[in-house]
Amino acid sequence: MNQVIRLSGVEAIGYHGVLPSERTSGQRFIVDCELEVDTKQAIETDDISHAVDYSAIAKLINDQIQAEPVNLIEVLADRIATEILKNYLLVKTVEITVHKPEAPIEVPFKNVSTTVVRTSEQW
């Protein structure tokens, strides 16, 4: 039995981007995460050890935002998805959206984001 867990708006300061100013000043990155999780055993036992701990997922996302800088948010999104799939075997599919609302764009805008979807079969 699979269910979906959604974790929205995990926010941290990161130093990702292609411009030198982005690497020195940093900026907000916001991540939304959707996990398709095998919940059969968790439902049967009501035991957290048989479930995906979404607080641990939030910490993983936060740590990845603050980790070694990359040029592209596409790489950051893929890195987060990869770490989740490597560390949480109950996750069957992960969808990660990275928002960069303070990107250095010269025209008015509200947000720029990218979304990646990865499955456990890819590992």
Image: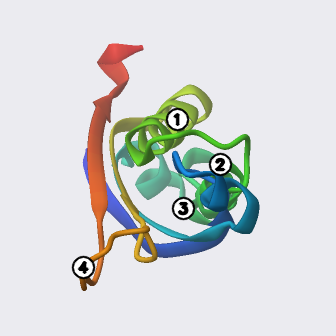
**72 left or right of 120 in image:** right
Q: Which mark is residue 79?
A: 1
Sequence-wise, the earlier of marks 1 and 2 is: 2
Residue under pointer 2: 64
Residue beneath the point at 72% across and 53% down = 63
Quick one: 77 or 55, which is closer to the camera? 77
Image location (x, y in percent) of residue 27 = 61, 71
Sequence-wise, the earlier of marks 3 and 4 is: 3
Quarter residue 38 falls in: top left
Sequence-wise, the earlier of marks 1 and 4 is: 1
Residue beneath the point at 61% across and 63% down = 58
Secondary structure state at the residue bearing disc 2: helix
Question: Could you tell me if the residues under marks 2 and 3 are in contact, i.e. CB atoms within 8 Å?
Answer: no
* Amino acid tagged 1: Arg
Q: CA distance from mark 2 to mark 3?
A: 29 Å
Front position among marks 3 and 1: 1
Front position among marks 2 and 3: 2
Question: Could you tell me if the residues under marks 1 and 2 are in contact, i.e. CB atoms within 8 Å?
Answer: yes
* Mark 1 neighbour class, 10 Å CA radius: few under 14, some 14 to 19, many 20 or more: some
Image location (x, y in percent) of residue 67 = 73, 46
**53 left or right of 103 in image:** right
Residue under pointer 4: 107
Specify the quadrant that holds the N terminus: top left
Residue under pointer 3: 46
Question: Could you tell me if the residues under marks 3 and 4 are in contact, i.e. CB atoms within 8 Å?
Answer: no
